[in-house]
Amino acid sequence: MYTHEVQIRVRYGETDQMGYLYYGNYAQYYEVGRVETIRSLGLTYKELEEVHGIWLPVVSLDMRFVRPAYYDDLLTVRSTLRELPGEYIIFHVEVLNEKKKLVNAGRVRLCFFDSKLKKVVPAPEYLLEKLRPYFTVDGRG
């Protein structure tokens, strides 16, 4: 299992009339978590796209809202890979407030898409090499 955390402070423009973090912004926070998780492995989305020709489109997004987050809250976005990717990579995400209480949780599933072949392909070996040390023999964390 591989987990990475990044902190994000809720900005005023991200809140709704009630003063809560607007629900639509959670998907963007999930994206920050994904991008920074990949970066923590020594890769970047930009490198995947421009050097290797691999895109990572979102296939599905599920989330649940547990409690509100407010303007100026410092949130922790915890992104976890529970298994080695195949044709898909699944990020399990938890958004925690400063009291370490769960605010939001969900799952994002993306595929590895070869931009030249225009088709879904298996996870690239260079990514798997970086992840394998965090997983057991069966590919689970």
Image: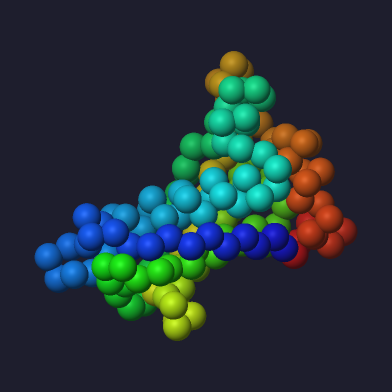
Hey, which quadrant is residue 14 in on the image? bottom left
Residue 13 in the figure: left or right of residue 4: left
Q: Residue furthest right?
A: 137
**Which residue is found at the position 47% from the left and 43% from the top?**
59
- Residue 65 location, x and y as percent? 35, 71
Q: Nearer the viewer, residue 72 or 15?
A: 72
Picture residue at 57% right of the left edge, 62% below the top: 5
Whether residue 128 is visible, yes or no, is: yes
Q: Nearer the viewer, residue 49 or 116?
A: 49
- Asked if residue 113 shows in the view, the reply is no
* Residue drawn where x is 67% and y is 39% of the image: 43
| Colour scheme employed for the rendering of this structure | rainbow
135 left or right of 70?
Answer: right
Where residue 6 sits: x, y (%)? 53, 60
Quadrant where the C terminus sits is bottom right
Point out the image quarter for the N terminus: bottom right
Q: How many marks?
A: 0
The quarter of the picture where residue 120 lies is top right
Q: Quadrant of residue 16?
A: bottom left
Q: Position of residue 63 (x, y in %)?
A: 40, 63
Single out the residue that lies furthest toward the left. 17
Residue in the picture at 31% in, 68% down:
72
Q: Is residue 124 above or below residue 10?
A: above
Most extreme residue toward the top is: 116
Vertical relation: 5 (above or below) 73: above
Relative side of 10 to 81, left or right: left
Tell me: 66 left or right of 86.
left
